[in-house]
Each structure stands twice: as structure tokens, then as C-alpha cells.
């Protein structure tokens, strides 16, 4: 299944994305710290002469996640995943921002997160909420059903899928992302079938 511009969410790429995210989880570090360290180490040959050295915090983030500082292997390039994760974290709301958007309290927002009525990315003691799941001052139609069908799919992988056009979701001459499809009133059934078939969804 192609996803339009950017990285396609194929079985191989989704598995690689999950492994990348798992590094931060196992090392108990904030994902954006790992992204910053990767971006700095990979940008324009950062290991070449004259490049600024990594800070102690960035080195710790990479080493704690068991990232090989000699660079990616021939068949793996972590840079696209670092870029993708960085973009996803930027395109999200804080708990206070999300609560204000929905017109509810922060505690009510956390209750929705715990019941999987909203998708969130844990950042230390706080949550970041991707904006694709909001439709004006309300949650996206059928969001709870989509999250249930996504099962164990990581919220960051889900974010990429929900925001990229899918050829199975066509309206007129254009392809819509699952989020756009649901926001436009499209039937939820086709979206549930598609998300259930994604790698790691169960």
C-alpha cells in the first residue's frame, strides 16, 4: 500500500520504524532526544573533520539506545526515521492545548487517553496528541473504532498512516488520507479494514 509522498508504510518499513521507536522505549529516554542526537550525527557528515561534536547528552541518548556510532549499515538508513519522528512530534498538541480544543478538563482528557478514545504519545510524564485526530473542536468521527482496530500499532506509525493519502480512499479524482476520509463523512468500514491489515495491528 503506497502512502503518497514520504515513506511508504510497508511491512519492512513499519517494522524498522517500530524497532527505532523501541530503542527509545528500552533506553527510557525521551524520543525527541534520540531524534536530535541522530539528526545531529547524520546531518551533512557530522563525523567529518570540522563538524561540531555531539554533546554529552546527545552521546548518552545514542549510547543508551545502543546506536552504533560508526553510522548506519549498508541496508539501513535511520535518517528518514529520525526526520519522520521529529515531524510527528512537532505536529502534535500538548495536553493543555488538546483539552482546550475539545473544551474539556485535562483530567477528562487523560481519561479519554486511558480508554483509548484519543491517541497519544507519552513524553516523560506528559502526553502529546497528534492533530490528525481532531476535527475542529471535536474528535475525528469514529476515532474510538479506528484506535480499537489499530490494536498494538504504535501511535507514531498510526500517525503516518492516518495522514497519508491511500488509493483505497478516493473521492472524485483525488486520494484522501484516512483522517481526511473520516472528516469528510466517508464510511468507517473501509478504514477499519485497512488499518486492521497494517503490520503490527492486531
Image (cartoon, rainbow, N blue to C red):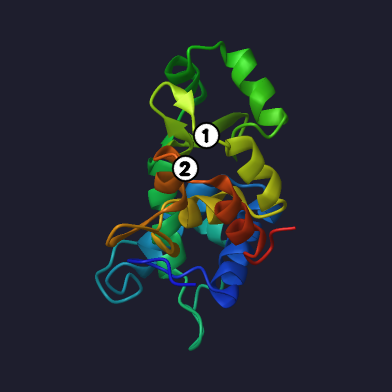
| Residue 65 visible (yes or no) | no
In depth, the one of 75 and 14 nearer the eye is: 14
CA gap, disc 1 and disc 2: 6 Å
Residue occupied by mark 2: 182
Mark 1 neighbour density, 10 Å: few (under 14) some (14–19) many (20 or more): many
Q: Residue at x 51, y 73 (%)?
A: 69
User: On the picture, is 99 further left or further right than 41?
Assistant: right
Q: Residue at x 49, y 72 (%)?
A: 1
Q: Residue at x 50, y 80 (%)?
A: 76
In depth, the one of 173 and 11 nearer the eye is: 173
Q: Position of residue 8 (x, y in %)?
A: 45, 70
Mark 2 neighbour density, 10 Å: few (under 14) some (14–19) many (20 or more): many
Label at residue 141? 1
User: On the picture, is 123 further left or further right than 164?
Assistant: right
Secondary structure of residue under mark 1: loop
Instruction: Name above or below for residue 106 compared with residue 32.
Output: above
* Quadrant of residue 142 within the rendered picture: top right
Q: Position of residue 84 (x, y in %)?
A: 42, 58
Label at residue 113? none
Instruction: Name above or below for residue 112 compared with residue 163.
Output: above
Q: Position of residue 17 (x, y in %)?
A: 56, 65
Q: Residue at x 47, y 55 (%)?
A: 160
* Quadrant of residue 64 within the rendered picture: bottom right
User: On the picture, is 60 further left or further right than 49?
Assistant: right
Residue most toward the left?
Answer: 50
Residue most toward the bottom?
Answer: 74
Residue most toward the right?
Answer: 202
Q: Are marks 1 and 2 in contact (CB under 8 Å)?
A: yes
Task: Tally the marks.
Answer: 2
Amino acid at each position: 500500500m503506497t502512502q503518497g509522498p514520504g515513506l511508504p508504510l510497508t511491512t519492512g518499513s513499519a517494522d524498522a520504524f517500530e524497532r527505532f521507536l523501541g530503542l527509545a522505549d528500552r533506553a527510557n529516554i525521551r524520543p525527541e532526544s534520540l531524534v536530535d542526537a541522530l539528526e545531529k550525527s547524520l546531518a551533512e557528515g557530522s563525523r567529518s573533520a570540522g563538524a561540531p561534536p555531539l554533546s554529552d547528552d546527545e552521546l548518552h541518548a545514542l549510547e543508551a539506545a545502543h546506536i552504533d556510532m560508526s553510522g548506519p549499515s549498508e541496508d539501513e538508513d535511520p535518517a528518514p526515521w529520525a526526520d519522520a519522528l521529529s515531524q510527528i512530534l512537532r505536529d502534535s498538541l500538548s495536553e493543555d492545548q488538546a483539552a482546550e480544543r475539545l473544551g474539556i478538563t485535562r483530567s477528562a482528557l487523560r481519561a479519554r487517553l486511558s480508554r483509548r478514545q484519543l491517541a497519544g504519545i507519552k513524553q516523560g510524564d506528559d502526553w502529546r496528541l497528534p492533530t490528525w485526530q481532531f476535527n475542529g473542536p471535536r474528535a475525528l468521527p469514529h476515532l474510538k473504532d479506528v484506535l480499537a482496530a489499530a490494536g498494538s500499532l504504535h501511535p507514531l506509525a498510526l500517525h503516518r498512516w492516518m495522514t497519508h493519502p491511500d488509493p483505497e480512499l478516493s473521492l472524485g479524482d483525488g486520494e484522501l488520507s484516512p483522517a481526511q476520509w473520516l472528516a469528510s463523512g466517508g464510511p468507517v468500514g473501509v478504514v477499519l479494514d485497512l488499518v486492521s491489515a497494517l503490520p503490527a495491528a492486531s
